[in-house]
Amino acid sequence: SAAEKGGHEYFMLKEIEEQPEALTNTLRGHFESGRIILDEQRISDQDLRDVDKVFVVACGSAYHSGLVAKYAIEHWCRLPVEVELASEFRYRDPVLDRDTLVVAVSQSGETADTLEAVRHAREQKARVLAVCNTNGAQIPRESDAVLYTHAGPEIGVASTKAFLAQIAANYLVGLALAQARGTKYPDEVAREFAELEAMPAAVQKVLSTVDQVRDLGRKIAESKAVLFLGRHVGFPVALEGALKLKELAYMHAEGFAAGELKHGPIALIEDGLPVVVVMPSPKGRAVLHAKLVSNISEIQARGARTIVIAEEGDETVRPFADELVEIPAVPTLLQPLVSTVPLQVLAAEIARTRGYDVDKPRNLAKSVTVE
Ligand code: G6P
């Protein structure tokens, strides 16, 4: 009923609007007496300190949350991080030992490939930390440590609030490792946590763009394809934006690292093709920002319809943006928590305009428990 959907036509929009709360609930209780704490830890602090390599294994949107985590964990912990599709990882010969931490990210905690990746890792004596939205699911049960996301039940098949909660939980994993390894001073960990705690309000702010983005979605709903560009943490956001559009609107959509533009994707640009560009902060990442401005001007000159997601007050992008969606200024590494939101709304509205069931896209299941 409409009441269950919080007055919305479909659950996905309700769940998009629940994201500030999902983040608040996911962060709650994880910073006590000056320390990041996990929900369950069956390995010693010493074992965490000894970690010398991290793999993140996951599927679908959870995999994209892992790609975001790579930037944070490398930066905060000075540890090598590989992010792997669980279905590839489990059939390769990944090099693991007891000092490897495998972070398994799964909303359901029951995804078959992710569960098998966990078992594969444990057979090689690696430690496994689960990030999961479902209490007592199989993946956390078989892991050495657990951090639960508290997004609440997610009805929409395409992940939204669970995805944002996974990103937040992955940051907590990074801070827990930095704390264990001493690569961040306790006051720095406290500061990073305080920045995370400010994110629900920033996500609330970005929700004020929902109507603008829905209008935009209706305008481009009949396009044949949409491209997404980003770099640094904006790259996984571009991948997630494209995945959402495939899942919901059954459109051809691709996410690219903007630095690869001239190595292929620019050949796809044709008159009227919508290209969504996720801009880094002009202050936080000035060099990358300048490169992206140049990318946008190049694709616009070739006829692309540019849809630019940029920090509020970023005037340099304005001349090249056919559509500009403003997001609040936040710390660089945390930007995916805000920049993802307009892309979720865009995909949902395009799907709705094309007459599709936003909550139950064809051929997809909420969790893939058989291969
Ligand atoms: C399915 C869902 C996706 C989800 C993926 C991984 O494909 O439709 O939304 O990201 O499974 O699910 P998990 O429960 O492991 O996070």
Image (spheres, grey):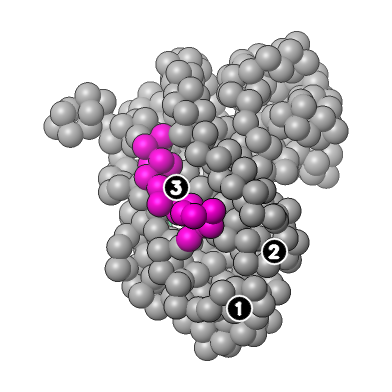
Label whose residue precedes the other's in the sequence (2 or 3): 3
Name the residue: 64% across, 18% down. Answer: 312
Q: CA distance from mark 2 to mark 3?
A: 21 Å
The label nearer to you, 2 versus 3, is 2
Residue 25 placement: quadrant = top left
- Residue occupied by mark 1: 46
Q: Which mark is residue 182?
A: 2
Provide the secondary structure element on which disc 3 rests: helix
Q: Which mark is residue 27?
A: 3
Label whose residue precedes the other's in the sequence (1 or 2): 1
Residue type for callout 2: Gly
Residue type for callout 1: Gln
Label whose residue precedes the other's in the sequence (3 or 1): 3
Tell whether circle 2 marks a residue whose Cβ is less than 8 angstroms from ligand 1.
no
Provide the secondary structure element on which disc 1 rests: helix
Asked whether, in this view, residue 171 is left or right of residue 319, the answer is left
| Coordinates of residue 106 in the picture (x, y in percent) | 43, 61
Magenta includes 177? no
**Front residue (pair 274, 30):** 30
